[in-house]
Image: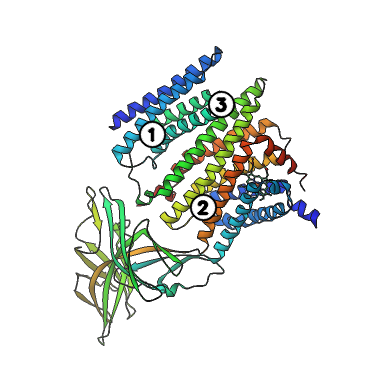
Amino acid sequence: MSMAMERTTLVAAVTGFAVVLALDVLLRRSGKPAWPTVSGGLAIVMALLTVAVAGRWLRESQGPFLTLYDVLLSNLFSLTLVYLVAAWLVPALRTASAIVSGFLCVLGVWSLTVSAEAVPLPATFDNPWLWLHVTAGKLFLGLCLAAAATATLLLGRRASAAPDSGEMDAAVWLALSLAFVCHSFMLIAGAIWAHSAWGRYWAWDSLETWTFITWLCIALLLHARVTFRRMPVAYGWSAVVAIFGLAILTFLGVPFLSVAPHKGVM
Amino acid sequence: MTLLLKSVASLKLTFVGLVLLIANAFAVSQWPGAAIPWLVLPLSVLALNLLAALLVRHAFRQQAALLLFHVGLLVLLMLVAAGVLLRFDASVEVVEGTAFDAATVTPRGTGWLHSDKLDEVQFVQGPLEVRYLSGLRRDTTHSRVFLTRPDGSEIERDIGDRQGFSSNGYRFMATFNKGYSVLVQWRDLSGRETIGAVNLPSFPEFEWKQSNEWITPAGESLTLELKLADRIPEDRPWLLRSRDVDYEVGIVGSGQFEATAGPGQSVAVAGGEITIVDLRLWMGYRIDYDPLLPWLLTAAFLALAALGVHMAQKFAAPRAADSAVAAGGEQAA
Ligand code: HEM
């Protein structure tokens, strides 16, 4: 697939997110069930993203792991997939679909503004633990997005004095807890990869440090729920949203602001 | 005593410990050098807190997987601490055709309890090749080494970016750091000959600065500069190796002394004569000793599995888990 085709497919996918968002809002406003249309729409967008990722992968003969564009493109794919599967399994997560589509649309627009030129992967990236590390990271971010979007909706409902949903609250904590498990695996697989690539399993480079901070923040939040049982629920939801913000900064900000060895060296 | 144990086991202390650890990790992101040693403080608080909690908290007794996860965390922490005390981290440059010499190693971090067995490591550096893609992008590294095992037998290993080798518990990893080395022979005025290697800066990273100082056995300071006949091709793949390289060596000494010598040529300098014997490559290795690594990995996977089971149990039977948690809150034991 040529680069032009890849970009066109991506533009179509980003437009798809916008259309799904609009349909979602319209259907919910008119009191009709939104999920069948929304999930169908997201599945089509996912198919477009699959084509874009696979086309790029085949053309460049390497996975989308390195540049900001690679990471944005692969995350658009994985976040959509993880959200769709999570919402299919846990219906309470479906309520936040508009927030998810809106977020993915913004991410998509961002991906269209950055350079799509491929940079060859350093030899150290040729390692199965990297695959597991990346997969776990994508699962983490997808689950975290599902949790944060649902928490945002709950916060909105609180503000407009609409009734809380116990099921949605439970879904937030389920998604965040599973995200924590995935994050833990990501850290372990990353450490194994780092050890084989650079001879050390941990080096406190900025990406590692911020990833560790994110992990600790989730542990802190899970603990806070057990320790301060009378903590207002809105505090917990706000913290979930903040953790997602931190995770996005860590995944999409830190690696591209630092010269961490994660980028590979000549 | 039990009262003291219970207060040390407080979940509020866990909260404080975690907040301190996060603050410390943030400090590490800003000032890595200064802040890393301070991690000991929150980690010690959390370790004591967790140890006490494991002894007295009901929540752990009722939820085996949660218990195992936290035991795993504690074991991990202890293994990391022991690893820091035992570990050895260093770098070394070894020239093609020469034997590894422990005396040339540059340590970067030596644990207080590390007992040095590095001089028992024996290997000879074989030929080295680094492939580059066009645009001078590093591809694969092939560094052949001839390793002498403790029983005296020899094995040959091909070391690359993903494949290091271990000897005596020390792991040697090839790094991206490698360069040329000029093999020189020194002959003093009485005819005595010695041979030595002058390693030049990393190549091709410092292609523009291929010179280094060498003090001759007569005490004269010389600067050797490698002059390569060909520039690195940027528009096609390229192979870095020491064979078939067209070169000369510029020799600059005190008092305006300047000469150029090709392979096999000699130049008379103060106190003797220097002969350019050969051009070789040196390979930069990272040496790492951490005997507890397999245990660390086992503990990490056990903790992860336990965490997974805990979460599965908790969300498969939310009511049951919730009541267990309620029993294990601040009023535990
Ligand atoms: C250092 C002292 C620690 C103590 C005393 C402690 C204690 C506890 C206790 C009593 C629970 C029970 C909560 C429940 O049943 O849901 C718990 C849960 C948990 N702890 Fe810790 N913990 C400590 C450290 C940590 C650390 C460092 C982490 C990870 C970074 C961690 C992660 C967790 C997780 C993930 C849960 C499960 C929460 C949930 O099910 O929602 N803990 N901890």
Density class for disc 2 (Cα within 10 Å; few <14, some 14-19, many ≥20) is some
Mark 1 is on which residue type? Answer: Val
Residue B103: % across, % down: 42, 74
Q: Judge depth for marks 3 and 1 and give the one in front.
A: 3
Whole-number angstrom distance, CA of label 2 to CA of label 3: 39 Å
Q: Is residue A184 left or right of residue A155?
A: left
Residue A253 in view of the camera: no
- Residue that extends furthest to the bottom in the rendered view of this protein: B190
Marked residue nearer the N-terminal end (3 or 1): 3
Q: Are marks 3 and 1 on the same chain?
A: yes
Residue B125: % across, % down: 32, 68
Q: Pointer 1: what residue?
A: A114
Mark 2 is on which residue type? Answer: Trp
Magenta span of residues: B95-99
The dominant secondary structure in magenta is loop
Whether A202 is among the magenta residues is no
Given residues A111 and B159, the one toward you in this image is B159
Residue A157: % across, % down: 63, 22
Q: Pointer 3: what residue?
A: A91
